[in-house]
Image: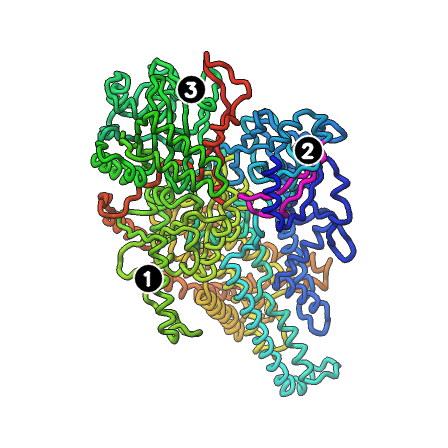
Amino acid sequence: MMRMCTSWTGRNAGLNVTWKVKANDRPYHQLPEFKKKVFLCIKKSKYSGNAIKTYKYNFLTFLPLNLYEQFRRVANVYFLALLILQIIPEISTLPWYTTLIPLVIVLGITAIKDLVDDLARHRMDNEINNRKSEVLLNGRFQEAKWREIQVGDVVRLKKNDFIPADLLLLSSSNPNSLCYVETAELDGETNLKFRMGLRVTDERLQEDHQLADFNALIECEEPNNRLDKFTGMMLWDRERYPLELDNMLLRGCKIRNTDWCHGLVIFAGGDTKIMKNGGKTRFKRTKIDELMNYMVYTIFALLILVSAGLAIGHTYWYEAIGTKAWYLFDGKDQTPGYRGFLSFWGYIIVLNTMVPISLYVSVEVIRLGQSKFINWDLQMYFAEKDTPAKARTTTLNEELGQIQYIFSDKTGTLTQNIMQFKKCTIAGLIKPFSILCQLVDWSWNRYADKKFQFIDHSLVAHVRSKKDKDAMEFFKLLSLCHTVMVEHKDDDLVYQAASPDEGALVTAARNFGYVFLSRTQDTMTIREMDQEMTYEMLALLDFNSDRKRMSIILKFPDGRIRLYCKGADTVIYERLSPSSKHKETTQTALDVFANETLRTLCLCYKDISAEEFEAWSRRHKEAQVTMNDREAALDAVYEQIENNLMLIGATAIEDKLQDGVPETIAKLAKADIKIWVLTGDKKETAENIGYSCSLLTDDMEIHYGDDVNEKLTRRQASRRDDPQAYRRGKKKTAEPFFPGSNKNALIITGGWLIDFVDMACECEAVICCRVTPKQKANVVSLVKKYKKAVTLSIGDGANDVNMIKTADIGVGISGQEGMQAVMSSDYAFAQFRYLQRLLLVHGRWSYIRMCKFLRFFFFKNFAFTLVHFWYSFFNGYSSQITFEDWFITLYNLAYSSLPVLLVGLLDQDVNDRLSLKFPKLYIPGQQGTLFNYKNFFISLFHGIFVSLIIFFIPYGAFLQTMGQDGEAPSDYQSFAVVAASSLIFIVNLQISLDTSYWTFVNCFAVLGSIAIYFGVMFDIHSAGIHVIFPSVFTFTGVASNALRQPYLWLTIILTVGISLLPVICIQFLSKTIWPSVGDKKYEMELKEDDDKKKPAPFQRGRRSRRSAYAFSHAQGYADLIASGQSFRRRPRAHGGPQESIREIPRREAENI
């Protein structure tokens, strides 16, 4: 032990270990040397508390912080400045309340929404921080909340407890302080991993008083996000002991199959690896948000130009006319230039509604409603686990309708990580022969797993008859050649395997009558039909990613020695004996299995003489104790025995996809969305799943990493040879990487992730294998940066968090126990198949609704505001208003807001069924054709046209007219009422023309808005309210006087008709001559029926994809089994079912 410790110290002498933890000594961590400066001279301990904080506000900071955040919006600052200007009497032409009331309402609604969101974050934080654990305090274990745990505390955990912090495992109820953990919250995988305490802590820290006296000093690396690495050292009683990741229990994992364990807190709260791995929270903003801000800046620039032009006009008018008109003399000694300057600010106030104050709050209300519709969608509800879809943000809904690239994890996202034994070939014969057979009845086998399904009764009969020696040897191999651990629970066998693949194979053997019962350090016991047999295990040759196979050498009860081996066909065929049978027929079967995208595995055996084994065993023992490159030495020894093998057959396992994955990917591909799979798995496995889920098809040409390197090298060479073509400011060459019209797919590993974006974007599908979480995020960043594309990432584990946060939209798969991805996501649901509904229905609707809302919102404000502009030519550019004060105040709040708001919430061009049936309807969103600067200027010119009509038709009607009573109603106030009434009718009827999906609510909103306008107008024009507030309500009796004149009603009707007639004509022509994608949906239906293809036959000449061998993708734990560390110290003699510990080998963080 000392030699090992010294060696570790020497190797890590240069390691910077500044993180020190003293067991059971809280004051130690408050020493001045561990303080860090927070602000000026204020210092605090560098060790985080265990409470986590994701909320933004508290009781004291909510108001100032929220107002600060809201006034970071330029529009809110602008309206605050307007309010200040309106207080200045010399330039104010509108009362201050016309701006204050809308501003307060907007700020208030936004603040309430932010408060509700933050209260939800408070509740979630409190739920986690108030979980209970047992902490060693004052010599005994006491129940404490997670928030109270500190670095250096000793914690006791029990079975099914979540781990509250990053702990150093000290001891457990299992032998050798083994502790089994489920890492679903870290990587989405539910198979168990094991961790092991140091021998010294296992032997000396079992009792409470021993733990209370524990005073070791831990020196280790600073907190970081490396889930696959930990380096440290424990100093205890003048001895040094090396620490590694296998000794750590990470926060977010769950204790399984371990009654209790003790751990020392090394990292707490925000310092834990799971929190560090979360990455930086990025503020996400939609493309429409950015475009909308630029448009607001454009409107503001127009406002400045128009106000400046009118101010100059007022300067010249006052100099030419105003100074000579005695009735305009106001007693102020002001020059025309100064009056023009005041007029400029007056027009800034009058025309301020060009920049709509209610725009932002209306957008937030629409987004909130869209989020609720997603939450309420029963077709995205997963009843099996009672998991509804959840929109965790309210700001990104319309971006769901513009996705161009989807980046998906594999394990747990596309697949269920559940393997099923589907087929096999034994002695060249494929089993089952037909898929028409009924399911096999396993009632004859009391050990059978009732969930296991198989359809070939003949194979069962052959095995039960004991006449088919090949079939018997086949299933005997499956029951013996593995590292599975078994536990007996209630007369049932529970297998825990290194990977789901191994579990599926052992379960298959169990159902066919070859039942794995138990194992010890050097024996394995199985039940062969009705006979129990114990085999002596002489050697276990473990799997690793280079060997791609595993073997076991057994001594049979009759003294024979036999090697059983299973592995990928690519390595097994190289090691077969020349006399081995069934090579060609098995090869054909493997091709058939590959065409069905099943994961295949070849099985073989070899009989070994006692002399041969003795000689090999000596070399094996020498390799086991070598100090120089032990793994290479062992591999070389393994090669010497794994040759001249005899082929028995092959297995075919289905890596079960989630329901609806192939259909979803096919639908999204038709919507011109490109799907990339980013996974930590190896290339063969990822490729196999690519075919299973229809991401890869047989008509695609697959390009691998080497091809990528060759093409990129060629492109860089041509760039060097012709530098002029790549000079700054010139376009890059348009020469494609893949000439021709064939479909292409890219399968690359983590090392090929540089300079491949252009090439990858030419492909129909891309699969990136062996990528780390950081590389996943880098891939997303590359596409966002260089393609300016809208991206979506979807995953289910902590290794996907970085990718989820980097993408424009992050989606978490919920329903499993791992919730880290969901906590960092924008949207969450339980199944990958719901993605098509989220994008093609909710995303598309949200985008169309938001675009239609914005186009109309800009139009109605231009039509309303620019009436003041035309009026200025008749009032000496004196910044006088056309409408009444209260009409200006309530126009956007009450008279015109509800109908357009409901269009933004409820409108549909087609229903959800057609949206899913015709994925090409999604394409306009990707192209951004429904809202851009072109649409903005169309809305602007439409507003200019309508404002012209609203002003000049009533103006012309009022020039020479006489009422029924002989009096001329051509006063300013009556003109204002007629123009305002015309405007209200026009905007409400215009939104009616633009509404595609009518409901009772829409109809009520349109009629109700008009009714509210007339009701409020008659009230504020009444004599009673004028008596109470004579200076505020000045249009006394105007409405009742003007609107009793039929002539003025005819004027309103004429104004409305001339405004709407061109719109009706243009809509008719556009639907008949220039139909949109939605208008052509029925033609698309016929075309889609014609385009249906038959499935392509398997192409035998292409590269095989069957090498996705059914194994764990990291080295197994044969050493642990052989050492006996996983077994009870006092195993019982085998007389009944032997109890053993469930063991799951770790996988060296394959997804990290």
Q: Residues within 10 Å of mark 1 (few under 14, many from 20)?
A: some
Q: Amino acid at mark 1?
A: Phe
- Which of the pair 885/277 is nearer the observer? 277
Q: Coloured how?
A: rainbow
- Which of the pair 934/666 is nearer the observer? 666
Query: From mark 2 to mark 1, how far is it between C-alphas?
Result: 59 Å
- Locate residue 644: give its quadrant: top left
187 up-or-down from 302: above or below: above
The answer to whether one can see residue 1095 in this image is yes
Q: Amino acid at mark 2?
A: Val
Label 3: which secondary element: strand
Q: Amino acid at mark 3?
A: Leu
- Which of the pair 248/776 is nearer the observer? 248
Residue beneath label 2, please? 154
Residue beneath label 3, please? 517
Whole-percent x, y for residue 323 in the image: 67, 86
Q: Which mark is residue 737?
A: 1
Q: Residue at x 28, y 17 (%)?
A: 464
185 up-or-down from 464: above or below: below
Whole-percent x, y for residue 62 in the image: 70, 50
Label 2: which secondary element: strand
The answer to whether one can see residue 1014 in this image is no
Q: Residue at x 70, y 85 (%)?
A: 335
- Which of the pair 675/986 is nearer the observer? 675
